[in-house]
Amino acid sequence: RAADKLVLLDISDGGSKGGGATDLELFSIPNVEVSKDLSSIAGSKVVIITVNAWSSAKSYLEVLQSNVDLLRGFIPVVSYHCADSVLVIASQPVEIMTYVAWKLSGLPYKQVIGIGCNLDSARFQHVVQTLTNSSEEPQSGWVIGEQGADK
């Protein structure tokens, strides 16, 4: 088992905007806590950051600045409560957000990992498998690079 407990930390003003319970069905973790308190993640071994401010009304640079501002507001607190954890960054644009999170955290670079292209590649492989009606392992295929201004 990878984890005994999963803490979903929602620091947004409007409540959770993610996949919710549907996404949780992918995991078999019996102990799930939803919190708005950053101290609830104290001692975590892995912290996955998924903040995003994507909006069709914003330009790429405005979204980038909004995401940096979001990270600036809580990454130092996360690294305080979880100094020995690995930060996994899944916020877009992942390359820039990973660098910003690393700098803001003060953690060694080996403890801050970006997974945007890996996640996009897994989605791509799933789409190919679905379109080809294949029940076998997903086909090899990789998405490389950031989304850019056109998303």
Image (cartoon, rainbow, N blue to C red):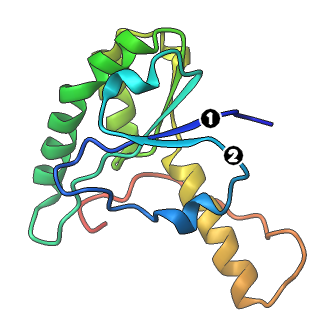
> Is 24 positioned to the left or the right of 16 in the image?
right
Disc 1 is placed on an element classified as loop
| Amino acid type, residue under disc 1 in the picture | Lys
Other-residue count near label 2 (Cα within 10 Å), few / some / many at <14 / 14–19 / ≥20: some
| Amino acid type, residue under disc 2 in the picture | Ile
Disc 2 is placed on an element classified as loop
Looking at the rendered image, the quarter that the C terminus falls into is bottom left
Residue at left offset 31%, top offset 46%: 51
Q: Position of residue 27 (x, y in %)?
A: 69, 53
Q: Position of residue 19 (x, y in %)?
A: 46, 65
Q: 137 or 147, which lies in front?
A: 137
Label 1 belongs to which residue? 5
Looking at the rendered image, the quarter that the N terminus falls into is top right
Other-residue count near label 1 (Cα within 10 Å), few / some / many at <14 / 14–19 / ≥20: few
Q: 126 or 17, which lies in front?
A: 17
Q: Position of residue 96 (x, y in %)?
A: 32, 37
Sequence-wise first label, 1 or 2: 1
**Inter-mark Cα distance, 1 to 2:** 6 Å
Label 2 belongs to which residue? 29
